[in-house]
Image (cartoon, grey):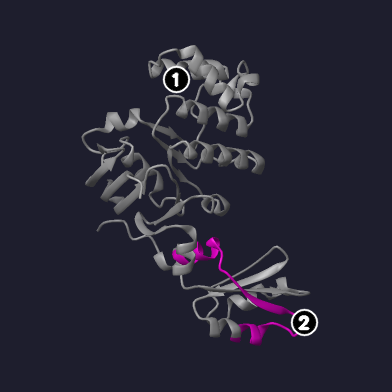
Amino acid sequence: MSAAAIDVYGLVKCFGNKVAVDGVDLKMPEGQVWGFLGPNGSGKTTTIRMICGLLTADEGGGQCLGFDIRKDANLIKQATGYMTQKFSFWEDLTIRENLAFVARLYRMPRMGRKIDETLEGLGLSQRQNQLAGSLSGGWKQRLALAAVTMHSPRLLLLDEPTAGVDPQARRDFWDEIHLLSSKGLTVLVSTHYMDEAERCDAIVYLAHGKLITQGPVHDIIDKAGLFSFRLVGEGVRELTEAFRGQSGVDHAAYYGNALYISGRNRNALEQAIRDVAPDHVTAEEVKPTLEDVFIELMEQAGTDKRMHG
């Protein structure tokens, strides 16, 4: 088992009378990629900021990279790369000028060589004199990744880094993340995309500021206790609403030319299929998807009860 890059317990953060994070424990080994998931407002960003020293926890504590998250916030920040959701670099500077500014902030030795190596490593050399403001979403994302990894951090925190970029850019970005992880970097990334979650070594799911579940994707799916069926046949899409009204059917959705239904009672699902599906529609049991599980987790979490009073 690898040493823990992050080992925090009981993290609580309030803003006014609203509890943004409510007793989160997290232990993450070094050199892995973990996904942080949950609906908007679930406390993902606030938790990330407490871990890396940008916010002080109201309660709880622990360590990040061997440093105390309360006492050693500056040391944690120096050893961490944090990429925000919104592009936060200077659009009226070139790619190279942006990296030069960051290098001066970190007082890097052999600055010119380090910038050259960073540009080369992320395929930015040909565009180094292009203004950041003229870049597409995917290239801005690559510039941001270059800037937050140039000082060779031990931990990389990414807050919804692929929002608003095209599928190819997302795929390229994740290839870079796994390459960095293979060299020993620990990565914690918040995302809404199920395909990205499935590329992580483990995932953490938050709802209403509370930790709902964590672990490898296959373990979370197996432990969810869900059953799922795939139905195909002419007109199967028109059956979606009928299935949603059936006892035991927790979720029904049409995609990929098939209707998928899921729930916690296999017998009830089979009965719903007998009651609703015409003879020409065929059904087979399939493994529940991560999306099925997350929808179930959201429903279990219920409404937000974090307001005091």
- Quarter holding the C terminus is bottom left
Q: Dividing the picture into quarters, in which one does residue 95 lie?
A: top right
**Gap in angstroms between the C-alphas marked 1 and 2:** 63 Å
Span shown in magenta: 271-297
* Residue at 78% in and 74% down: 234
Residue at 50 percent across and 35 percent down: it is 86
Magenta span contains residue 106: no
Mark 2 crowdedness (10 Å alpha carbons): few <14, some 14-19, many ≥20:
few
Residue 194 visible in the picture: yes
Q: Is residue 74 left or right of residue 117?
A: left
Kindly identify the amino acid type of the residue bearing the numbered disc 2: His
For disc 1, the marked residue is: 102
What amino acid is labelled 1 in the image?
A: Val
- For marks 1 and 2, the one nearer the N-term is 1
The relative height of residue 30 versus residue 130 in the rendered view (above or below) is below
- Residue 78 is left or right of residue 151, and the answer is left
Q: Which of 133 and 3 is in front in this view?
A: 3
Residue denoted by label 2: 280
Can see residue 92? no
Residue drawn at (46%, 29%), measured in percent from left and top?
149
Residue at image location 64% in from the left, 30% down from the top:
136
| Dot label at residue 187 | none
Left or right: 43 as drawn, with respect to 256: left
Q: Which of 236 and 113 is in front in this view?
A: 113
